[in-house]
Amino acid sequence: MNSRWELFQHQADIGVRGIGDTQDEAFANAAMAMTAVIADPKTVVPLHPFEVECEAPDTELLLVDWLNRIVFEMATRRMLFSRFDVCILPGRLRARIWGEAVDEERHQPAVEVKAATYHGLSVRQQEDRSWVAECVVDV
């Protein structure tokens, strides 16, 4: 999978954007962008795998649920994640995520992501057939 993601400013918060050849890749890359809000994803070793499932009535709400599920996993497990294998089915998402415990010295976390929001929420296919999944995260 080609990791294409971007961050963008939004008032006091930060936007995350994942780009991919498929919706699955775009969602995975949006999750990688969210990791990049906190720390350099290259410093996060994908050691421990976890299964994640989400359900929502449409793909935009599914993106918010997906990112908020990762926020929940980061907070409760005190981990960062750097590998995401996503499979989107109608109304649901199944994924395997890999990460490691936060190491303050090595990861140097910049901020804490509190939640993915509905601001700037969009999941769309572009003219070049690539997919973009984006929203603003509350930091």
Image: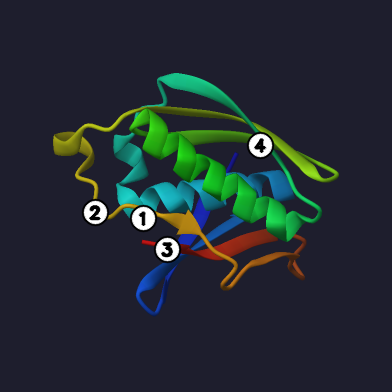
What residue is shown at x 19% (from left), y 44% (from top)?
A: 108
Report the side of 66 relative to 46 (left or right): right
Q: Kindly report the distance in space between the C-alpha atoms of the residues bearing marks 2 and 4.
A: 26 Å
Q: Position of residue 11 (x, y in %)?
A: 39, 80
Q: Kindly report the distance in space between the C-alpha atoms of the residues bearing marks 2 and 3.
A: 14 Å
Q: Which residue is mark 3?
A: 138
**Of callouts 2 and 3, which one flags the residue occurring earlier in the amino acid sequence?**
2
Dot 3, how many residues are within 10 Å of its Cα: few (below 14), some (14-19), or many (20+)?
some
Image quadrant containing the N terminus: top right
Do the residues bearing badges 1 and 3 touch, measured as CB atoms within 8 Å?
no
Q: Which mark is residue 86?
A: 4
**Of callouts 1 and 4, which one flags the residue occurring earlier in the amino acid sequence?**
1
Dot 4, how many residues are within 10 Å of its Cα: few (below 14), some (14-19), or many (20+)?
many
Q: Position of residue 121 (x, y in %)?
A: 62, 68
Q: Which residue is mark 1?
A: 37
Three-letter amino acid code of the residue under disc 4 = Val
Residue toward you, 91 or 132: 91
What residue is shown at x 46% (from left), y 35% (from top)?
A: 73
Do the residues bearing badges 1 and 4 touch, measured as CB atoms within 8 Å?
no
